[in-house]
Image (tube, rainbow, N blue to C red):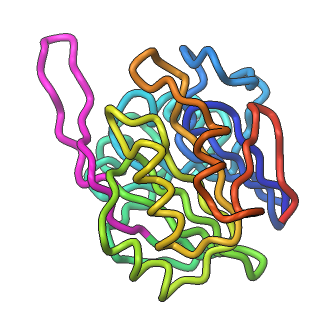
Amino acid sequence: MKISYHGHSVVKVETNGKTIIFDPFITGNELTDLKLNDVKPDVIIVTHGHGDHVGDTVELAKKNGSLVIANFELATYLSWQGVKTHGMHIGGAYEFDFGKVKLTPAFHGTGLMTDHKEIIYLGMPAGVLLTVEGKTIYHSGDTALYSDMKLIGERHPIDLAFLPIGDNFTMGPEDAALAAKWLQAKMVVPIHYNTFPQIKQDPEKFIGMLEAGVGKILKPGNYINL
């Protein structure tokens, strides 16, 4: 299984002949190495309804016939755009043909701005536990530190965790380091940093806060074989 990082919160998993992409914010993402026309996902998982996470979901899904997985409200909204969706909610799990997806809590906001200066509420933000090929990947989405991460780590052995370190909108490095400890993940990759001035961070400092050998920095385009 090949797992690659592509700037901000974009993560791609290639497994069992399927390509799964998380939070495909490509257009407008100056850090990504991806070209929109080259991305051909079978499955798109969206953690919450902010523009830098929904990103190019609708265009990609329409072009490629992708299945979009998200919380029920966001999935419903995207289905109105002509996209094939599967709605879920916090604490729920579902066994797909490519693997198992379970949504976890994420403490954050959600909503898209309209041209009329209105905000469309799009359900609760989520983290995602993806279990494929006997391995569990945790994409926390945008979240603050919260104590139930201990419970997630105790109940779900995590092989690889993607955690935000940008601060301002999400956990900063110190809180993310504590989250990594609570989650007991075998490997932790920092995400959601350096895309905007407000979330400028040094990932090396974050790695230094973790137990030896746990942290790994992936530059956009870098990957891990799990």
Instruction: Choose top left, top right, bottom left or bottom right for residue 36.
Output: top right
Residue, x 67% and y 38% (percent of image)? 204
Q: Is residue 109 magenta?
A: yes
* Chief SS of the magenta region: loop
* Closer to the camera in the image, 41 or 181: 181
Numbered circles on residues, count: 0
Percent coordinates x, y for residue 213 in the rendering: 77, 62
Q: Nearer the viewer, residue 30 or 62?
A: 30
Residue nearest the viewer, comparing 30 with 149: 149
**Which residue in the rendered view is the most extreme toward the bottom?**
155
The percent coordinates of residue 118 (x first, y second) are 12, 21
Residue 216 position (above or below residue 36) = below
Tell me which residue sits at (58%, 53%) in the image.
Answer: 209
Residue 203 as seen in the image, left or right of residue 172: right
Question: Would you say 204 lies left or right of 18 here?
Answer: left
Picture quarter with the C terminus? bottom right
In percent of width and height, residue 126 lies at 37, 57
Q: Quadrant of the N terminus?
A: bottom right
x 48%, y 29%: residue: 55
Q: Could you tell me if residue 97 is visible in this image?
A: no
Q: Point out the stretch of residues depicted in magenta.
A: 103-125
Q: Is residue 4 above or below residue 178?
A: above
Q: Is residue 86 above or below residue 113?
A: below
Along the viewing direction, whichever of 148 and 113 lies nearer the viewer: 148
Residue 130: image x %, image y %? 59, 68
State which quadrant residue 7 falls in. top right
Q: Is residue 65 above or below residue 220?
A: below
Question: In the rendered view, does 16 fall on the left or right side of 208?
Answer: right
Please name the residue shown 75% across and 82% down the image.
134
Let me know if residue 123 is in the magenta part.
yes
**Res 202 seen here:** yes
